[in-house]
Amino acid sequence: MQSMADPIRLVIVGATGMVGGYALRYALGHHSVERVTSIGRKSLGVSHPKLKEVLHRDFADCSALAETLFGQDAAIFCLGAYTGSVTDAELRTITVAYTIEFARVLHRSSREAAFSFLSGKGADPTGRSRMPFARYKGEAEKALLAAGFPRAYIFRPAYIYPVEPRKEPNFSYRLLRAIYPAFRLLFPNQVIRADDLARAMVNIAVQETPKRESTVFENRDIRAMSIRFVCRRSD
């Protein structure tokens, strides 16, 4: 268990992605975080005194990461793929197999590490959903919650607003970005800003707590967490 004086050593997987990128920026400026280890396939192109970058090409086998993952206090896992951008088989491999394999090696190397996982709205651990994304995210969630982490946090955001301009992955995302102001007013619990989501994932993973817990956060919960954080910061 972390003491109040202990600095945090944090791992981020998927920092070249949208949410992972915000998590990286936030973690590098976090007063409790001493070291951030980014693990990914591509270089970040970022230099920072707190940052250690590790390139790893094959997440189907994370055995080579055992030494890197030794002594870590928390992990933020944002690796994933959009539905339609890869085949169904690839989507399951990325969503389920890569997550489980990384978690296996992390838990062996750092048994007390906390784990924050980027899942998605509608994730179905029962495997009954007709949507592959929901089944695969649910399968990954179920495996993580059974992996033995003392603190495991599952984040199920709905529509993630990109904040900064980007090339949207498909028509649905282009439409949602266009109507976001109205959509947010009408359905506030169906949207979350990417930066707010990232902050929530980092904050709960690095919090100092003696509790052992496994928690699933729906979009409403994530919004509440981000609001509480803003209120504390403005005090």
Image: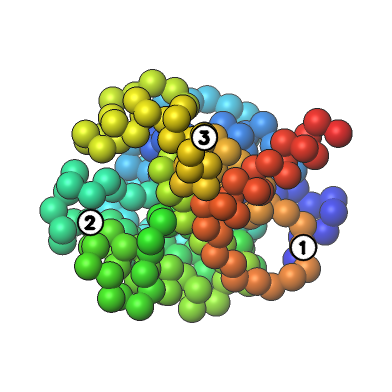
Percent x, y of residue 190: 46, 46
- Sequence-earlier tag: 2 or 1: 2
- Residue bearing mark 2: 91
Q: Nearer the viewer, residue 181 or 148?
A: 181
Dot 1: element = loop
Distance between the alpha carbons at the discs numbered 1 and 3: 35 Å
Residue contact at pointers 2 and 1, CB within 8 angstroms: no
Percent x, y of residue 136: 30, 65
- Residue bearing mark 3: 185
Dot 3 crowding, Cα within 10 Å, few <14, some 14–19, many 20+? few
The reply, left or right, for residue 17 in relation to residue 227 is left
Dot 2: element = helix
Residue contact at pointers 3 and 2, CB within 8 angstroms: no
Amino acid marked by disc 2: Leu
Q: Nearer the viewer, residue 130 or 99?
A: 130
Nearer to us of marks 3 and 2 is 3
Amino acid marked by disc 1: Thr
Q: Is residue 42 above or below residue 131?
A: above
Distance between the alpha carbons at the discs numbered 2 and 1: 35 Å
| Picture residue at 28% right of the left edge, 25% below the top | 167
